[in-house]
Amino acid sequence: MIGLKTKIAAGIAALAMVLGYQSYSGWSAHKTTDARIAELDTQLQSSREAREADAVKISDLTAQLATVQDRVGVTAEDIAKAQKAAAAARKEQAKAESELRKSLDQHAKDVATLRDQSEEKLQAVRQEATSQIGQVTGQVSTVKVDLDATKTDLAANKREIGDVRDSLGRQIARNADELATLRRRGERDYYEFDLRKTKDMERVAGIRLQLIKTDPKARKYDVALQVDDSKLQKKGQLLNEPISLNVGKDRVRYELIVNFIDKDHIRGYISTPKDSVSGGTAALQ
């Protein structure tokens, strides 16, 4: 009996445990379900808010799409106009290129014509220049021959002048004794003068003389000479340096020599061919 009671009590306790477990399990499941429902509500709310946000975005995108469509329509119209303008421009460019090509062709023809004409003129000029060069070359040859002859004449004249100078050097009287010796030879006539610096000219052997200035230290003097209407000055003349004068139509040679120089004072003589003073007219050189 006691065993049966014990078993019954144990069964009751086990049943109570089973019922308690079941009750706990039901409560726990209910609580989990409530939490899941709350979570689903939260997700549903989030989904609803997301849909509302998406609706706003869709509205904005729709407005932007309309704006873009308007802009695309304007751009398409502008592109059509631009294409039309470009076609017209290409047509004008093609026309201009055609005209330019024609102009260049004509220009090339003109250049070719001018080149041919220039070549002909150049050839003519070359021929003329060659002819003229030949003539000039012949003239140069002639001038060269004449120049060689002139050089020969000049050399002969130089020798003659040197001989005359040597002869004059031997015939110059440097003092009264040498002048007396020349007179005794009787080859020429001699006319002495004694000039001082004055405003007047002195006549000697048909020639007028005037002393301008002297430089005794350098043994130089300046003198003015006048023959008929011809007058000149000899400056820086040296002592015993002859001054040659061609006289008259026959150009007879006179010689003036100063053999004494002092302050504002000179002495010397004029040498003339025999008996030539009376009718002679002197030309200075």
Image: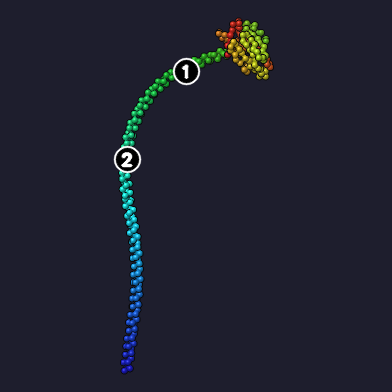
Residue 34 in percent (x, y) is at: 34, 76
Identified by mark 2, the residue type is Glu
**Does residue 263 show up?**
yes
Q: Quadrant of the C terminus?
A: top right
Residue assigned mark 2:
92
In the picture, measured across the screen, residue 117 lies left or right of residue 265, that is left
**Does residue 238 show up?**
no
Which corner quadrant of the image does residue 163 belong to? top right
Mark 1, mark 2: which one is toward the viewer? 2
Q: In the image, what residue occupies the spot 63% across and 15% down?
A: 223
Neighbour tally class for label 1: few under 14, some 14-19, many 20 plus, Cα within 10 Å: few
Query: Answer yes or no: do the residues labelled 1 and 2 have beta carbons within 8 Å?
Result: no
Q: In the image, what residue occupies the spot 34% across and 53% down?
A: 71
Residue 154 in percent (x, y) is at: 53, 15
Circle on res. 241: none
In the picture, measured across the screen, residue 231 lies left or right of residue 132, that is right
Neighbour tally class for label 2: few under 14, some 14-19, many 20 plus, Cα within 10 Å: few
Residue 231 in percent (x, y) is at: 59, 14
Nearer the observer, 115 or 44: 44
Which corner quadrant of the image does residue 177 belong to? top right
Q: Is residue 47 above or below residue 262?
A: below
The kind of secondary structure element at disc 1 is helix
Q: In the image, what residue occupies the spot 34% across and 30% down?
A: 110
Residue assigned mark 1:
144
Identified by mark 1, the residue type is Lys
Distance from disc 1 to disc 2, alpha carbons, whole Å, reads: 73 Å
Q: Identify the mark nearer the N-term, 1 or 2.
A: 2
Residue extending furthest right? 263
In the picture, measured across the screen, residue 134 lies left or right of residue 160, that is left
